[in-house]
């Protein structure tokens, strides 16, 4: 595991963009699962502005680690956010964007998406393998859409599960723990002071850190990188 701490979220976005560009260099096929929420917005903006015309996006296939069960036009949609901050600014073929159909019936969509991953990705012991999974972490220690109150979903047999947001009750489709940990590489993008306590618990293995789904991210490849700003890393021992 590697920790990369930068002064602010702008610098995290810049450094991650450089890292991503390096990862996809010379790759003719690269499958990446994106995270949602608000952290990726600045990352996608910087990626588009710094590498929009430098990366051959036709070699990259985009998926989501989780999506809210809302239409793609809804402001809650991770797909909509990604169009606004990335896809609207780069030349990516439509067929390379594999969105979760947020407007569909959640259980059916979870099954459809799991099948799509099986078809599109290489499989390791039957589990679809992403080249890269990008994750965020909630203030409650959730990741993708595996929340602490239903942490058992992490070990679900199905590659994709239907989760429920603990406060809003909003349904979400999420990849499970096995798909995350089968990825060739996993990157956390975590910024802001609100994350500091959970970052400290998970990386310091203190309090009941194993109650936080983000603590279960441990790719078999060993390739796990945390990109953080100083606020999110502020409680880590130097
Ligand atoms: C989502 C995300 C989720 C997110 C965390 C952090 O759909 O909301 O995939 O796992 O990464 O909630 O969200 P912020 O970046 O908004 O803090």
Image: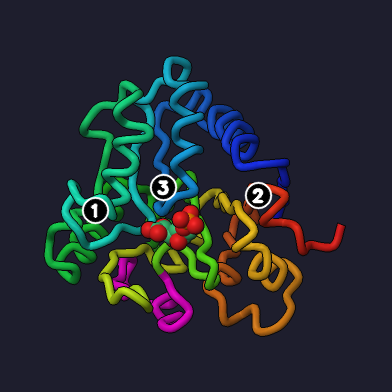
Task: For marks 2 and 1, give the CA distance.
Answer: 27 Å
Judge from the rendering whether residue 118 lies leftward or rightward of residue 137; answer left or right.
left
> Callout 2 environment at 10 Å: few (<14), some (14 to 19), or many (20+)?
many
Task: For marks 3 and 2, give the CA distance.
Answer: 17 Å
Give the percent coordinates (x, y) of residue 219: 57, 60
- Disc 3 + disc 2, Cβ < 8 Å: no
> Callout 1 environment at 10 Å: few (<14), some (14 to 19), or many (20+)?
many
Q: Residue furthest right?
A: 238
* Quarter of image, res 176: bottom left
Sequence-wise, the earlier of marks 1 and 3 is 3
Give the percent coordinates (x, y) of residue 202: 67, 70
Sequence-wise, the earlier of marks 3 and 2 is 3
Q: Which residue is mark 1?
A: 100
Q: Is residue 74 above or below residue 200?
A: above
Which element type, helix, strand or loop, lies under badge 2? Answer: strand
Which element type, helix, strand or loop, lies under badge 1? Answer: loop
Q: Which residue is mark 2?
A: 228
Taking the spot 43% from the left edge, 77% from the top edge, the residue there is 155
Q: Is residue 152 above or below residue 41?
A: below
Which element type, helix, strand or loop, lies under badge 3? Answer: strand
Q: Ligand 1 within 8 A of label 1's CB? A: no
Q: Residue furthest top?
A: 53
Residue 157, can we see it? no
> What segment is highlighted magenta in the picture?
146-164
Give the percent coordinates (x, y) of residue 40: 46, 45
């Amino acid at each position: 595991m590697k920790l990369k701490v930068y002064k602010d979220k702008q610098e995290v976005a810049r450094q991650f963009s450089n890292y991503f560009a390096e990862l996809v260099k010379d790759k003719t096929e690269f499958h990446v699962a994106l995270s949602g929420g608000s952290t990726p917005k600045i990352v996608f903006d910087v990626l588009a502005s710094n590498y929009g015309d430098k990366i051959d996006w036709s070699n990259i296939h985009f998926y989501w680690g989780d999506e809210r069960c809302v239409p793609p036009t809804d402001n809650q949609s991770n797909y909509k956010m990604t169009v606004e901050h990335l896809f609207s600014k780069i030349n990516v073929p439509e067929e390379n964007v594999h969105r979760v159909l947020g407007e569909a019936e959640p259980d059916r969509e979870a099954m459809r998406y799991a099948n799509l991953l099986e078809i599109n990705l290489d499989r390791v012991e039957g589990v679809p393998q992403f080249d890269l999974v990008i994750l965020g972490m909630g203030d409650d220690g959730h990741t993708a859409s595996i929340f602490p109150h239903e942490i058992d979903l992490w070990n679900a047999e199905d590659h994709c599960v239907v989760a429920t947001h603990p406060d809003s009750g909003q349904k979400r489709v999420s990849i499970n723990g096995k798909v995350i940990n089968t990825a060739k590489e996993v990157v956390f993008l975590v910024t802001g002071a609100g994350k500091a306590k959970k970052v400290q618990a998970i990386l310091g293995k203190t309090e009941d850190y194993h109650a936080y789904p983000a603590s279960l991210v441990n790719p078999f490849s060993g390739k796990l990188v945390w990109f953080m700003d100083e606020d999110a890393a502020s409680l880590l021992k130097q």
